[in-house]
Amino acid sequence: MPKALKLVLQILLIPACFAIGLYGGPRLAQTYHAWFPPPQYTTGDHAALYRRAGNEVVMYATATCPYCAKARKLFAARGVRYTEYLIDKSEQANRDFIGQGGRAVPLLYIGERRIEGFREQAIVEALASAGGDARAPRS
């Protein structure tokens, strides 16, 4: 291969591959998530957490998170009793959050469901499936 052609290929091929990756990578990820959306929640046995918290609704949150504020507002509007652990205010809460594999707040445990992030529809469905246990007592 002539030296000039080799030089031209190096000069053009590397930036072209970089541009394709820079433009195509996010589009490919977006397409993948559109076709295969992540689950809204996972299920499991959270009885030990509920015994320790004293409630069947537990939220790991931060004081300044706007999505945590939305979850609080949703719980208040529905009269839901819950235990909240502020991971930015308590070392123990932060260790528990990390130990449970938490990556995003709010991290919610409702009944058998674990919901990471504010997903209003998933939260409402979890509250409905948890039944009356999550509701505050009526006076």
Image: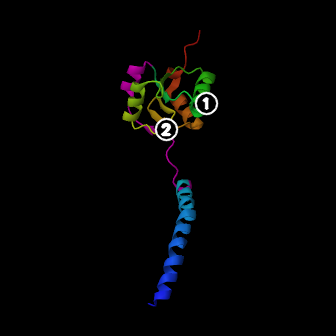
Q: Amino acid at mark 1?
A: Lys
The stretch in magenta equals 34-54
Where is residue 30 shown, x and y percent of the image? 56, 56
Q: Is residue 115 magenta?
A: no
Residue on which the image places disc 2: 104
Residue occupying the point 42% across, 20% down:
53
Residue on which the image places disc 1: 70
Total tally of numbered discs in the picture = 2
Q: Quadrant of residue 96?
A: top left
Q: Amino acid at mark 2?
A: Ala
- Which residue sits furthest bottom? 2
- Label for residue 34? none
Whichever of labels 1 and 2 marks the residue nearer the N terminus, that label is 1
Residue occupying the point 59% across, 35% down:
120
Most foreground residue, 83 or 113: 83
Most foreground residue, 137 or 104: 104
Label 1 element class: helix
Label 2 element class: loop
Apparent side of residue 101 relative to residue 64 in the rendered image (left or right): left
| On screen, residue 6 above or below 117 | below
Where is residue 15 shown, x and y percent of the image? 54, 71
Image quadrant holding the C terminus, namely top right
Q: Quadrant of residue 26?
A: bottom right
Tell me how far mark 1 sits from mark 2, CA to CA.
14 Å
Dots 1, 2 in contact, CB < 8 A: no
